[in-house]
Structure formats: structure tokens, C-alpha cells
Amino acid sequence: MATRCWAFGTQCVAKSDHSKPKAGELAYRKGDILTIVKTETGKERYKARHNTTGEEGLISATNMREREAIRVDLSLMPWFHGKISGPEAVSKLRPVEDGLFLVRESIRHPGDYVLCVGYSSEVIHYRVMYQHSKLTIDNNQYFYNLIDMIEFHSKHKGAIATKLLKPKDKEGTKSAELELSKMGWLLDIRKLTLGESIGEGEFGVVYEGDYIGQKVAVKNIKCDVTAQAFLEETTVMTKLQHKNLVRLLGVIVDNGLHIVTELMAKGNLVNFLRTRGRSVISTGQLIRFALCV
């Protein structure tokens, strides 16, 4: 088997548990995500950081697989303008503003992308290369998809001239907010009362809340790029209404995106079954759960 050579920042997924680590090794469970922070000499050993706990230690590459890049439908992203030329991109970014940007598909290098950014009255073109299942501009910082890259450079200048401050929306891009408003799914922030946090995921915090007297769950997403993707997903959710699905009540766009759903007061069914549930639920009830799913 070929020797692995993973660069700093590479993300890996554990293929099995390593619950009894030796001195200096990192403990992890199957499915945990780890980030390479240093290459050790010999026998495919790396120093890695656990993405959840933040702990660092040695790992063996033989028990890892590299995390695959996520392919995102870029047509949903307002800043993605498809296959256009450099001069066309410059024209779209006029008048030039610092931090005004768009992403286009490269005509000269099919399969690669170009990040076009306004800075000091000029438009700078950064070729985004697809290498080893990841995207990079400078062969130093790697990303798993364009959304991750845009999110990063919206917060950090990194290898480019300026932070990404304002996307240049593609002409004809529909506003998900406007579409939801037309369909009656846009809710009023003034009628929402937020309570305690009841969970936190990769994309935001979930709160218990009250909307016009109804107990609700509210997922708050503050990152603009992630919110845009969730708005498009929410548009699909409006068409999926079933008694066995958590019901979407609507969305609120105010200081980020708030997705408002029914509150499942008894929590997560899987967690319930894995703990005390099996001892108090009959076989017949379990079969009914399965049929409902």
C-alpha cells in the first residue's frame, strides 16, 4: 500500500475506535474527525487535533481515511456566476469596491474556479485549484468546498488582498427571502420570544422559544453563506408536510437566519431508545415507531 502524505490541515475520519491510547497518543471513536497538525517520522504517524475536544496526540494513518470534499450545488450561491471570462467578471464588479467579489468557473483551466476580488480600484483574480480532493489558492490553506473558502476569507484576509466583504449577486438570482415571503413562510421577529439553548450543531445554536403562544424550536444561523444554503433547503422543506415529520413553521431573517419548527419536547428518539427507552417501551411500540419512520 502506498505511503500516505497528508499536509498540515488535512481532515481525517477515524475508521474504528482507539479507546486505549498509549502515552502521547490521541483517543478517538469511529467516525470522529481529526485535523493533522504535524507529520511524525516513520510508520505513517501524525500528530492530530480532535475537532470536537480540541485534544492533540499521535495517530496512525492506517486507522484513518481522508475526509472527502463536499460537492455543493453552486447554482444556489448568489456569488457564483458560472463560466464567464475575466473581462466579464471585471465588468460585473464595476464600480470597483474593496472586498466586492464573485466566483467564476475558469475558462482557461476547466474544473478550476477563480475568485475575483475588488481592491484598490482594481479586480484581482485568484485561481482556485482542485488538488487532492480539496480546494486551494496558495497551496497552503485548503478547503473542502467553495462555501468553506468564502466563509474563511469573509473572516480572515489570508492569502488574498482583502477580506471578502460584499458578494456581487448574479443577475437573475432569486431571493430566497422574497420567495418565502410570497409563499407566506416568512415570520415576524417581533412575535418570537427566545428561551434557553437546547442544543448546538455544526451550523448554529438551537433555542426553545414561543411564537404567538406556540412552543417552538428555533435554529439560529449567523453565517451569511451558510444561511443562504439553508434558505434554499428551507424552500424545499415547505413542500414536505407530513404528520411524521417535524413541521416547519417558517423562517425569520434578522441578525442571521432563524428556522422555526415544532418543538419536540421529549427530545431525540434515538437517544431515548439508547438510554432508558428500551426498558419501558414494548416490542409493539417499537414496531409502530419503525412503521412511522
Image: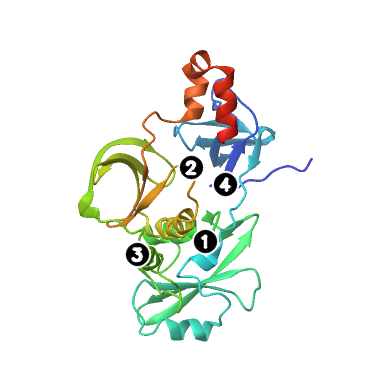
Camera-nearest label, 1 or 3: 3
Q: CA distance from mark 3 to mark 2?
A: 23 Å
Looking at the image, tell me whether mark 2 or mark 4 is earlier in sequence order. Answer: 4
Residue at position x 20%, y 53% in the image: 190
Residue 36 lies, in percent from the top left, at: 55, 41
Check residue 181 in the rendering and tell me which mark sits there, or answer none.
3
Q: CA distance from mark 3 to mark 4?
A: 41 Å
Looking at the image, tell me whether mark 4 or mark 1 is earlier in sequence order. Answer: 4
Local secondary structure at mark 4:
loop
Residue 104 lies, in percent from the top left, at: 53, 74
Residue at position x 59%, y 30% in the image: 290
Q: Quadrant of residue 214?
A: top left
Local secondary structure at mark 1:
helix
Q: Is residue 103 visible?
A: yes
Check residue 245 in the rendering and tell me which mark sits there, or answer none.
2
Residue designated by label 4: 10
> Viewed as shown, does residue 48 lie left or right of 248?
right
Residue 246 lies, in percent from the top left, at: 44, 42
Looking at the image, tell me whether mark 1 or mark 3 is earlier in sequence order. Answer: 1
Q: In the rendered image of this protein, does residue 126 appear above or below residue 61?
A: below
